[in-house]
Amino acid sequence: MPDPEQPQELPTRLLTDPEMINACRVRDFARIFRLVKTRAGIYPSMIARRCELTPSRVGEVITGRRQLLHMDVIERIADGLRIPGHMLGLARRHWETPQALVVTEPEAPQVREPEQQTPASLPGPDVDSILALATRTNLNTATLEAFRSSIEDYWRRDDQHGGEALRPAVVGQLRHVVGLLKESRPPAIRNGLYGIAAELARLTGWTYFDARQYSQARAYFTEALQLAKEIDDRQFMANVLACMSLQATYQDKPADSLALVTAAQDQARSAIDTTPPVLSMLSMREAFAHATLGNRDSTHRAIGEAHRHFEQIQERDPDPSWVSYFDEPKLIVDTGIAHGRLGEATTAEPLIADALRREAHTNQRGRAFHSFWLARTQLDQGKIEQACHTATRALEPASAVTSERVSGHLREFYGQLAPYRQEPVALAFEARLRELLPPVSGSIHP
């Protein structure tokens, strides 16, 4: 007798039922869960276990009190209930076998050849001179500055192109610096190397997070925490915990997200040198966690705290370099996104639009993210034409960066567009989508 807790194929009669097909097409999970219960005998508690959801969340979905929009959750439902990917607008799932219900092309095997993956337009970072310096017996402050300069360059390239091509160089440099820590060093050099290693580990974790490879990301974030703890850099530990909090938000684990950002704030407050931009960034991450939980008052309070801290910034503050990205446009766009997560689209739209006008055009991934968020807030208000125009403009920066998170935002917008799919402006958006981002192993297109 099959184990009822293990994923099993749903009955063919259910997968071919027009009601089930339509419910999947519009991602009506309340109907899907009810049909799975009545037609396949899979009860809510079993749905929760299979899909890595809490029973209370499944109950809220069934009663219509909660919607499921995050791509990671939708993928868990597809895998847990064995719903073929194409029915939910996903790529073909790894467990699917060829059958009449599968209409997507099979995924092409990926060959890992880092040297060949680096595109001609993005040459591998030139770290030979840095590594040559680092092999000298006596490291000095100039060596540390060279490492830090390379890290800043990695971050710029990550913003412009994504981290996939950079990762081998970053990991190699991380291991090299960790190796240098095994030798006896003067305290100032040793502490500097620990800080550099921590930043390289965080950057590696970030590239895995951006690729939605969450277990690898968590491992490197944890390594970054351990390295920063060696030198008691509490501000940096707060930064890493904030990254982990954001990842938990993407994984639809808001309780974990809130716990992590609370720990980050505790670390930051215990440091004597924590600056207003760091506190402002952490408050905004707290707002994201509360918004994902649906805590309206707490979200508004955290947003207010973020703005209050930001207003206390003074030019003479010795801010850490890793918080320099959190400027006024970033504060404004994150404020809009927090309101958007709460469903406050009319408040969110002008904030995100204003920030987009002021953002640097070199950050391709950020512009793509924020443009898709703007399109979603417009669609939430029924502004179909504006939403499609905004999303169409987002396709160009999206096509310039390798980022599964960008792809996820695109998929979410495309899913929300389902009721308007036959509108001329939606058809034009889809045509542009296929022109700029042709389907590759089902990774982008539904």
Image (cartoon, helix red, strand yellow):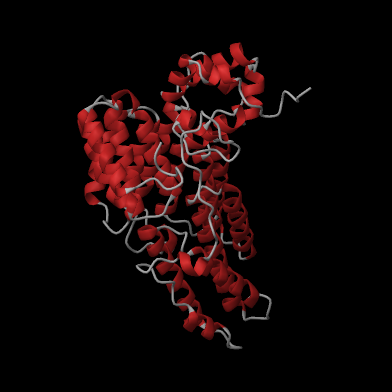
Coordinates of residue 136 in the picture (x, y in percent):
58, 88
Viewer-closest of 196 and 91: 91
Residue 262 appearing in the image: yes
| Residue closest to the far bottom | 137
Q: How many numbered marks are there? A: 0
| Residue closest to the far right | 1
Q: Please say if 113 is above or below 218.
A: below
Viewer-closest of 307 and 183: 183
Horizontal side of 280 relative to 388 (left or right) equals right
Q: Residue 344's quadrant in the figure? A: top left
Horizontal side of 266 relative to 438 (left or right) equals right
Horizontal side of 153 relative to 180 (left or right) equals left
Residue drawn at x 32%, y 61% is 315
Residue drawn at x 36%, y 29% is 416
Coordinates of residue 185 in the picture (x, y in percent):
64, 81
Residue drawn at x 50%, y 39% is 249
| Residue closest to the far top | 38
Horizontal side of 291 relative to 228 (left or right) equals left
Residue 324 appearing in the image: no
Coordinates of residue 203 in the picture (x, y in percent):
50, 60
Coordinates of residue 271 in the picture (x, y in percent):
54, 56
Q: Residue 94's quadrant in the figure? A: top right
Q: Quadrant of the C terminus?
A: top left
Q: Residue 412's quadrant in the figure? A: top left
Q: Quadrant of the N terminus?
A: top right
Residue drawn at x 56%, y 57% is 234
